[in-house]
Image: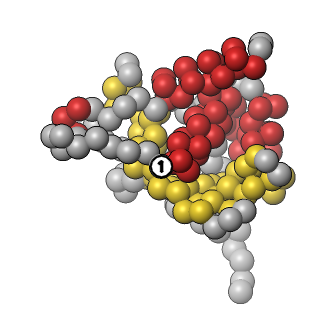
């Protein structure tokens, strides 16, 4: 695929994954703006999601730091390591979702990105539920690598976090 074709594919995937907010959600006369960093990380998060949905393990691996881990709110002391998260996420990819309410905190070579991931059915956002995620991205040369993802249900109703480990808790003494 040519570079132009790849860009068109990426933009199409992002459009499908990140539909615009419904008009009735916005205040009249108010036009939402997206910062340069929010735009950049919307694209990165969208590319990661598209690679997972498409079963593209090599693309996913390129976007993750070697020491990536997932930490889920329901079991914060039991991280899911990189290889297991990739395997689980590709075995049963998340349903299509939208990304909302993204915030990016830039700390030079580290960016902390938080967002609400909402399920999509027929191109429309589900009325209840969602996952609140905080992703820590580290600069790696001219690109960014996802170092750690913290995730939990946004509404407190035990939503399954895609790729999360169901392994028993390890009792750690401090």
Residue 10 in view of the camera? yes
Tell me if 50 is positioned left or right of 101 in this view: right
Q: Residue at x 82, y 31 (%)?
A: 58
Q: Quadrant of the C terminus?
A: bottom right
87 over 138 or under it: above or below = above
Q: At 54% from the left edge and 63% from the top edge, which residue is drawn? A: 105
Quarter location, residue 41: top right
Residue 33: x %, y % from top left: 38, 45
* Frontmost residue, 75 versus 134: 134
Find residue 79 and report its image quarter: bottom right
Q: Is residue 154 left or right of residue 80?
A: left
Does residue 69 appear in the picture of this structure? no
How far across and down, in percent of the image, does residue 148 sit?
Answer: 68, 57
The residue depicted at 73 percent of the width and 57 percent of the height is 138
User: Which residue position holds label 1?
Assistant: 35
Q: In which quarter of the image is the N terminus?
A: top right
- Residue at the far left in the pictured view: 28
Q: What scheme was used to colour the molecule?
A: secondary structure
Name the foreground residue: 79 vs 7: 7
Q: Nearer the viewer, residue 17 or 3?
A: 3
- Which percent across, then down, holds residue 18? 46, 32
Describe residue 86's horizontal placement relative to residue 58 as left or right.
left
| Residue 6 vs residue 18, the one in the foreground | 6
């Amino acid at each position: 695929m040519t570079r132009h074709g790849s860009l068109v594919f990426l933009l199409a995937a992002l459009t499908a994954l990140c539909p615009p907010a419904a008009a009735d959600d916005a205040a009249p006369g108010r036009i939402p703006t997206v910062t340069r960093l929010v735009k950049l990380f919307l694209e990165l998060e969208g590319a990661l999601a598209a690679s997972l949905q498409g079963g593209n393990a090599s693309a996913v691996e390129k976007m993750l730091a070697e020491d990536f881990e997932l930490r889920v709110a329901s079991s914060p002391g039991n991280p899911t390591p990189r290889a297991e998260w990739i395997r689980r996420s590709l075995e049963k990819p998340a349903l299509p979702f939208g990304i909302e309410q993204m915030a990016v905190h830039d700390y030079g070579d580290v960016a902390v990105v938080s967002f609400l991931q909402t399920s999509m059915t027929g191109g429309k956002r589900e009325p209840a539920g969602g996952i609140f995620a905080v992703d820590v991205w580290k600069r790696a040369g001219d690109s960014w690598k996802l170092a750690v993802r913290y995730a939990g249900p946004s509404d407190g109703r035990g939503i399954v976090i895609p790729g999360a480990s169901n392994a028993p808790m390890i009792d750690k003494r401090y």
